[in-house]
Image (spheres, rainbow, N blue to C red):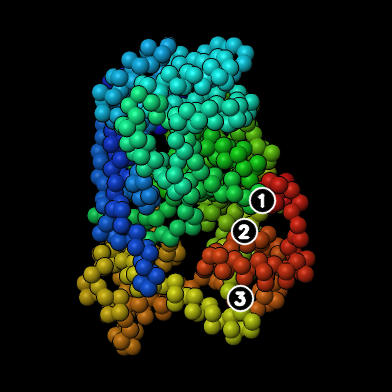
Amino acid sequence: MVGADGSAAALATVGGSRLDPDALRHEVADVVEVVRRLWDSWDDDAVVKDVTTGRYLDPDKVHHVDFTGARFSVKGPSITPRPPQGRPVVLASDALADTARPDVVLVGGSGLDDVRDRAARARDTGAFLVFAEVEVRLGDAGRRTHPDRLHYTGSPLGLTELLGWLAASVDGVRLHLADPAAHLPVLAGEVLPALRSEGLLVPPRPGATLRSASRARKASSRERPAAPRRVLHRRRPAVPLGRPVERAAHGDRDVRVGRTDAITQLSALAAATTRIGLVATQNTTYDFPADLARRLSSLDFLSGGRAGWNIVTTDNAWTGANFRRGGRLAHERRYERAEQFVEAALALWSGDGPVDRHTDLVNVRATRTVPPSPQGRPVLFQAGDSPGGRELAAKYADVVFSANTAHDQAVAYAEDLRARLARHGRPADAVRILPGATVVLGDTPADAAERAEDVRRRQITPQRALAFLEQYWGRDLSAYDPYGPLPDIAPTEGELDPSRGTIPIADRTGKLERIQRWREPAEAKKLSIHQLVLEVQPRQHGFVGTPGQVADEWAHYVRTRAVDGFTISPHLVPAALDDVVDRLVPELQDRGVYRTEYEGTTLREHLALP
């Protein structure tokens, strides 16, 4: 649904400057145009899912987008695969029809004649479908809440007749119910059956997308030109979860593709689960405090208090190019903005009144618009391991993710964090420490070790080996055979960008010397690219052994206060998680370091946070 709000109140939530009507319409046109380009940046057959090679997509079928508008620029492609219907259906009011070129135009009016006239004008814009906006209040009379919607007050029978009259002019309706809880049962039990019996409501075919269903209904309507077309149906989409991530090179950028939006994905999970926490990684550098606070609060409210926010920052221009702020935020100021951002979000969630903050990094004037969940607000997670990241965690976080998994490193990290907590006046148990952990279990120690080595070899596919070397070479190496010798071209001069990639920070300097050290064993042992990467890629500390051995090790971590738990990074879903649940958890429960049942319903209660 395309909207345009140039009011001072709306712009204050994102720190924008007010636009005149013409500039606002141009901005709408730019936004819709670039969004459509991003949706079309994947060919329909870009996803290949080649298990043999480990390739998820064909990079030649993911296309670069380089858009520069009047007020923003975007460097593509989209990081989300093309959906079954190609791209989402675009809706807009008739006031924006010429600008947005929507698939569905929504029209209102003061009466039936007004709706008919506006629908006729909307069809002249080339709209595929025209829907009427109808505000419904069944029973008692009430005042109109929106001046540009057709207003109906009366009985279910009268509503059925109204929808029948509208059918001669529009393809469907968008109903705005004054009291959804009371009106929906009446619609389902009386109005929709009556429309269906008159042939005015066509149910969607199983598996149909909104776009394909609309085409089918449009075709059927042409056979019955005087008959009503349909009322828009909503159906729950099937959301692919845990989709693999792969890189595709576009110009001088290395773009991660294959990821769906975290909050959207977690909203689908919220409807399908009742207990698990739902933590979305969201960036403070390029988001807006009021908007992100509202979206996270919505997830928290709808899930019954199970939402969390993993706070991250970035300063790189290749990400910033997709946002109004561009790449202008200096590296040393990213945590300064993060602190101001989090403070603004916390102030909004407190519900103590309007939030009005204006600095050179954050501009927000807004009030809370979503009710609090049973846990009050989303749980705050933080994963940065730099001094700035640790300070941010000590000031605001409820939970920290950590890469310090080896016991001595975990102890040192915990001691450092608790010292920082004390300096900020927070108790030592205010934050839960949950380092990432990979787990490989076996019936014997030897069996577990063999499985762990097999997992590692399967994870480092030939394509991933090339991608690993590309980070050091700074060049596209896709033309090289991963089973052949190291590239014979020289790497670029510059060091690795410390703000991108997954290589440990300590390994991002001295790359020329590192590459030379790799060439020597590669030539001596005649190693291929794939074989060399298997030898030199940094190995993360993992937990490998029998369920009893790993349980003993984890119990030691907890009892020495090195950690409060672990964040599982499964090597295979769901099999690796099944191993943890079925084999490791009972051993942990026997040792008294893992609960035997839930003690609450919210994420905050699950984590035993104060």
Name the mark on residue 319. Answer: none
Label 3 secondary element: strand
Q: Residue at x 64, y 84 (%)?
A: 444
Which residue position holds label 3? 441
Q: Quadrant of residue 376?
A: top right
Residue type at numbered disc 3: Leu
Vertical relation: 538 (above or below) 415: below
Q: Earlier in the sequence, mark 3 or mark 1?
A: 1
Residue type at numbered disc 1: Arg
Question: Mark 2 or mark 1, which is nearer to you?
Answer: 1
Nearer to us in this view, 4 or 219: 219
- Cα distance between the residues tagged 2 and 1: 19 Å
Question: Mark 2 or mark 3, which is nearer to you?
Answer: 3
Left or right: 349 in relation to 75: right
> Residue furthest toward the left?
489
Crowding near the residue tagged with mark 1, few <14, some 14–19, many ≥20 C-alpha atoms within 10 Å: some
Q: Quadrant of residue 450?
A: bottom right
Question: Mark 3 or mark 1, which is nearer to you?
Answer: 1
Vertical relation: 418 (above or below) 102: below
Label 2 secondary element: strand
- Cα distance between the residues tagged 3 and 1: 26 Å
Nearer to us in this view, 270 or 334: 270
Crowding near the residue tagged with mark 2, few <14, some 14–19, many ≥20 C-alpha atoms within 10 Å: many
Q: Earlier in the sequence, mark 2 or mark 1?
A: 1
Which residue position holds label 1? 275
Vertical relation: 425 (above or below) 415: above
Q: Residue 391, percent across and down?
A: 56, 49
Left or right: 429 in relation to 346: right
Name the mark on residue 434. Answer: 2
Q: Earlier in the sequence, mark 2 or mark 3?
A: 2
Nearer to us in this view, 407 or 72: 72
